Amino acid sequence: MSVPQSAQATSTAQSPPAANVFLTLLPITLAVFISFLSIGLPLPVLPLHVHNVLEMSTLVVGLVIGAQFAAALLSRAWAGNLADTQGSKHAMILGLMIMCLSGLAYLASLSFVSTPTLSVWVLVIGRILLGCGESLIVTGALSWGIGLVGPQNAGKVMAWVGVAMYGAYAVGAPLGVTVNQDYGFEGISLAVTLLPLLSLPLLLKVRATAPTALRRTPFYKVLSLVWGAGMGLLLCSVGFGSLTAFVALLFADRDWGNASLAFTAFGVAFIAARMFFGHLPDKLGGARVALLCVLIEAVGLLLIWGAHSPAIAYLGAALTGWGYSLAFPGFGVEAVRRAPPESRGVAMGAYVAFLDISLGITGPALGAVAGTWGIEAIYLLSAVVVSLSVLVALRLMRSPNAK
């Protein structure tokens, strides 16, 4: 048996049972879920607050939403190196504290509602802080989870962390509408401030993994290894970005009521796909799974584009969530296979950076599209872009052995 085959056999033999993987990851998963409610709660509320209360254009809505993802992108290298050199647990706890500060910025923005431009800039500061906190939490959770259960279970780690993230979106969106109706944007801001603190006790007793690197790894070196998988993530994430940023405005434009159920449909389908099929990227290969799933996502976006009733839009949101759910770990497994173990945190940061690029561009670009051709045009264009990730999946299938 060759050395690589021997190592692979040893890795498989030492892979913990699925139940143990779930229990090991449970505290981290719960902490991600609770903290990400700080992102989920404002999803259906913030675009309307900026558009209706502050009377800003759809382009400004896109810029405010996209500021979080731009900040997350710029902080990925720092977050990844922090996780590798100081430990993933340290990175994740620091991210929770920074996320609290974003809620305080949201609160501060309410003091300047009579000066809308200034209020928007304070909101942007809050979104930037939220992006930095999210970067540390996601990078820390992924690298910490892989460190605890092994790289052979990378797909499961991404699946469960993703369940927590998008479950928070699914629960947070309708909850955010309720909180906003009863307590206004001030209630949303207070929740964003307090929720990350509630998740801290879950992490304190979880075993910390040792730092995997003694010195900082140049981000560009790891980026060059994962860029292929990252491009797949970038393209397929446009569907998620268009849904989160603009579906509330689509529903308002068509007098369909609030869009919280569209977020719920997306989140429920996303979670169901990962719970029942989250093992497939590890088992069948990430690129194969991603290939099928991005096509499902594109069909969902086309349904939203052509919807003449809320029910069809809900179905489209569910298919978008189902497809995107496994595309993320599908491309992610390919990224892990191409990165050295000692740079796992940076690799996860580099991979997720493509999500940040996608969402950072999606907000303002699609906002401009909406201003010219109407809100519904966003979803036709998104379906076309998502379909392009099929080409990336095919390329990755042709070159499976990267390390």
Image: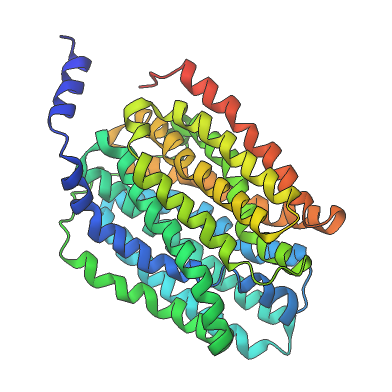
Task: Tell me the quarter of the picture where residue 134 sits.
Answer: bottom left
Instruction: Give x and y (percent) for residue 83.
Output: 31, 52
Report the colour scheme.
rainbow
Q: How many marks?
A: 0
Q: Give the quarter of the figure containing the N terminus.
A: top left
| Whether residue 350 is situated above or below residue 403 in the rendered picture | below
**In the image, farthest residue toward the top:** 1
Q: Nearer the viewer, residue 236 or 72?
A: 236
| Whether residue 129 is situated above or below residue 341 in the rendered picture | below
Instruction: Give x and y (percent) for residue 401.
Output: 38, 18
Q: Residue at x 64, y 39 (%)?
A: 299
Q: Residue at x 50, y 62 (%)?
A: 131
Would residue 241 be seen by someone viewing this image from the given angle? yes
**In the image, farthest residue toward the right:** 372
| Whether residue 118 is situated above or below residue 264 in the rendered picture | below
Instruction: Give x and y (percent) for residue 376.
Output: 77, 53
Left or right: where does residue 27 sit relative to residue 395?
left
| Whether residue 331 is situated above or below residue 89 in the rendered picture | above
Task: Tell me the quarter of the picture where residue 91 sits.
Answer: bottom left
Q: Residue at x 42, y 65 (%)?
A: 36
Q: Give the quarter of the figure containing the C terminus.
A: top left
Would residue 216 be seen by someone viewing this image from the given angle? no
Task: Tell me the quarter of the picture where residue 152 sits.
Answer: top left
Q: Nearer the viewer, residue 402 or 307?
A: 307
Instruction: Give x and y (percent) for residue 79.
Output: 39, 54
